[in-house]
């Protein structure tokens, strides 16, 4: 906030023949935590066991309760409607396409006038910060209107805004002109990451920045680049989607975009990515030693689950919802001596094995049926089970095959819905069940 814009970059890229697009994004106001009447809000339950980003760190629960919720009301909506002519998102100042999954509160009020209330969440940002983020209240309205709006919400009648919400319109480089390394085509050494690639979101930007930095260094060192595939990481899905599909709105990384989301669990990240990090010099000796020890424990855990009880391997018995790994403590020597994290992972592997096998079959099926023709005259808005985003892309681009539908950004999960609908033999019936 308060930073200057990057003048000249867009026009220079355009002068070199690159295609430039225009998107918009926004954010919500932040509120000082001491100006909130917390008793008037609804607490949202936190997880019992905290997660951690790294197997090298210890999880900690610094604040058991970090999220609360409330609702907008008629007074909130009246403030917005009375001042809508002052919102750059509505007065014509900002014309770019915004992120579908993060609409502004102005969008929600004006597009859904019959909705009497919209839920918003108050998230404590960190132990060290006084800022509380209001999820669901993204806005481009002036600061004085934001105060009026915020003060209509339960628990926020005396709220102090530490940072007002704002909307930004920005140019982006159409990402089909970017290589899998995130290097720009035909400009050696220029790597791009974040909003300039047509994405929206902090995590999406951070992921691209990491990959662009790694590959810039690999290029300088004359070594092989690091390119993650769709099976390797969500980062691989993100980059593959960007460079190989049609981006018509700011891209967000949703789990439904991945064919292999059961393989891409956070608990498998060390096994999937640590060896790659080691290759490019980002994994220290201490981390590598801890990783190797973890892999040895996982191997031991998997081996123990091969042992038979009542004639069946434990890993097969664990596929039953009512069966848990602790049921075999005392029966299989050494099982209860494994760390809790290792026990959790090998149990999940066993319970998910059937689903993972099915997901792999579905991924192979999608690849096999890429040439499957799609009807030209179907009303996609009437096909049940498809997301709004997929329907919009099918209506806009009218792909004539399943493969081309995937190429314009239809998610694998929706592609499976389309395939099931086609297999139902109901091409002429848009109300057929999938």
Image (cartoon, rainbow, N blue to C red):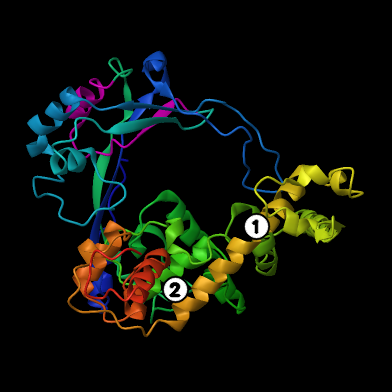
Residue at the location (90% across, 48% down)?
334
Residue at the location (44% across, 73% down)?
183
In this rendering, the answer to whether 206 lies above or below 180 is: above
Expressed as whole percent of the image width and height from the top left, the position of residue 267 reads 64, 52
In this rendering, the answer to whether 305 lies above or below 11 is: above
Residue annotated with mark 2: 183
Mark 1 vs mark 2, foreground winner is 1
**Mark on residue 132?**
none
- Quarter of the image for residue 289 reads bottom right
In this rendering, the answer to whether 141 lies above or below 316 is: above
The reply to whether the C-beta atoms of the residues labelled 1 and 2 are less than 8 Å apart is no
**Left/right of residue 98 with respect to residue 272 in the rendered view:** left
Q: Is residue 228 visible?
A: no
Q: Is residue 334 visible?
A: yes
**Left/right of residue 306 with respect to residue 51 in the rendered view:** right
**Left/right of residue 123 with respect to residue 79 in the rendered view:** right
Quarter of the figure that contains the C terminus: bottom left
The residue at the far right in this view is: 333
C-alpha gap between disc 1 and disc 2: 28 Å
- Label 2 element class: loop
What span is in magenta? 129-153
Residue at the location (69% across, 61% down)?
271
- Label 1 element class: helix
Residue annotated with mark 1: 268
Residue at the location (55% across, 76% down)?
219
Lower position in the chain sequence, tag 1 or tag 2: 2
**Crowding near pointer 1: few (<14 within 10 Å), some, many (20+)?**
some
Magenta highlight on residue 131 = yes
Expressed as whole percent of the image width and height from the top left, the position of residue 54 reads 66, 48
């Amino acid at each position: 906030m308060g930073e200057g814009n990057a003048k000249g970059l867009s026009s220079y890229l355009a002068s070199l023949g690159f295609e430039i697009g225009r998107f918009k994004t926004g954010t919500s106001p932040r509120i000082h935590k001491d100006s909130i009447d917390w008793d008037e809000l609804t607490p949202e339950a936190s997880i019992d066991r905290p997660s951690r980003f790294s197997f090298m760190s210890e999880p900690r629960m610094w604040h058991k309760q970090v999220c609360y919720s409330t609702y907008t009301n008629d007074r909130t909506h009246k403030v917005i409607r009375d001042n809508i002519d002052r919102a750059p998102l509505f007065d014509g100042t900002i014309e770019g396409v915004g992120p579908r999954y993060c609409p502004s509160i102005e969008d929600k009020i004006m597009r859904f006038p019959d909705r009497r209330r919209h839920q918003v969440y108050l998230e404590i940002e960190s132990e060290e910060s006084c800022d509380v983020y209001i999820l669901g209240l993204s806005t481009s309205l002036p600061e004085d209107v934001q105060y009026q709006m915020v003060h209509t919400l339960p628990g926020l009648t005396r709220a102090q805004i530490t940072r007002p919400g704002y909307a930004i319109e920005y140019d982006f480089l159409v990402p089909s002109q970017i290589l899998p390394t995130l290097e720009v085509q035909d400009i050696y050494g220029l790597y791009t990451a974040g909003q300039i690639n047509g994405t929206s979101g902090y995590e999406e930007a951070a992921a691209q920045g990491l990959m662009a930095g790694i590959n810039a260094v690999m290029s300088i060192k004359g070594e092989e680049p690091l390119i993650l595939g769709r099976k390797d990481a969500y980062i691989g899905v993100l980059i593959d989607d960007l460079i190989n599909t049609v981006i018509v709105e700011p891209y967000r990384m949703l789990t439904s975009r991945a064919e292999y989301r059961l393989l891409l669990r956070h608990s498998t990240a060390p096994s999937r990515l640590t060896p790659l990090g080691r290759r490019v010099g980002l994994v220290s000796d201490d981390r590598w030693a801890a990783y190797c020890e973890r892999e040895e424990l996982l191997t031991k855990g998997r081996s123990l689950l091969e042992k038979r009880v009542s004639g069946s391997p434990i890993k097969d018995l664990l596929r039953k919802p009512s069966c848990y790994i602790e049921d075999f403590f005392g029966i299989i020597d050494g099982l209860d001596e494994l760390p809790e994290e290792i026990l959790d992972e090998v149990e999940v592997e066993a319970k998910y094995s059937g689903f993972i096998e099915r997901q792999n079959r579905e991924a192979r099926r999608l690849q096999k049926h890429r040439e499957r023709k799609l009807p030209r005259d179907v009303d996609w808005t009437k096909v049940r089970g498809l997301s709004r985003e997929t329907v919009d892309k099918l209506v806009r681009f009218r792909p004539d095959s399943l493969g081309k539908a995937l190429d314009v950004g239809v998610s694998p999960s929706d592609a499976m819905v389309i395939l099931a609908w086609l297999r139902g033999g109901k091409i002429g019936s848009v109300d057929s069940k999938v």
